[in-house]
Structures are given as C-alpha cells and as structure tokens.
Image (tube, rainbow, N blue to C red):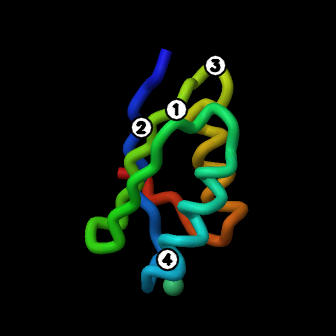
Amino acid sequence: MIQTTLIKIGGMTCMGCVKSIQTILDGTSGINQVEISLDQALATIQHDPAIVDVDQLKAIIEDTGFEIINE
Ligand SMILES: [Cu+2]
C-alpha cells in the first residue's frame, strides 16, 4: 500500500540541491513519486513502506548530505 510522507529538509540552498535529492529518491525502489519544494524545505514522498520506510527515507536524505528537521 502506498503511503504519503512529508519530510522537512534542512540545508537546501538552490535547485541543484533539490535535483540531487530528487535524483537519488527517484532511483530508489519502493518510491513512486517525489515532490520537493525548495521554498518550503519540504519533500512529499509517495512510497511503499513495506519496501522503504520513513526511517530509510530520512537516512537516504541524510546520506545525500542534508539534514532532517524534526518538528
Ligand atoms: Cu544547492
């Protein structure tokens, strides 16, 4: 079942940052759709949590060099 997860991301300064996160997530299996807003510092990710769960999404973003903002 597909789930939509919102993740706040710190450290994105330009569309290049957005593109690098987008590219990595797009290439990850279990992720159906990714939208990233630079203005809102927010990623909206549609994924199958049985394949890639929220903690794994956060780890992938951190490994790309950005930080997760927990609210
Ligand atoms: Cu950038």
What's the distance in space between the residues labelled 4 and 2, CA to CA? 19 Å
Which residue does the numbered mark 2 point to in the structure image? 5
Circle 4 residue: 11
Q: Residue at x 55, y 65 (%)?
A: 67
Neighbour class for label 4 at 10 Å: few (<14), some, many (≥20)?
few
Type of residue at label 1? His
Marks 4 and 2, the one that precedes in the sequence: 2
Image vertical order of residue 33 relative to residue 19, above or below: above
Q: Quadrant of residue 20?
A: bottom right
Q: Residue at x 68, y 44 (%)?
A: 28
| In front of the other: 44 or 59 | 44
Q: Nearer the viewer, residue 4 or 71?
A: 4
Q: Which dot, 4 or 2, sits closer to the camera?
A: 2
What residue sits right under mark 1 in the picture? 47
Going from the N terminus, do you reach mark 3 or mark 4 first? 4
Q: Earlier in the sequence, mark 1 or mark 4?
A: 4
Q: Cβ–Cβ below 8 Å for labels 1 and 2?
A: yes
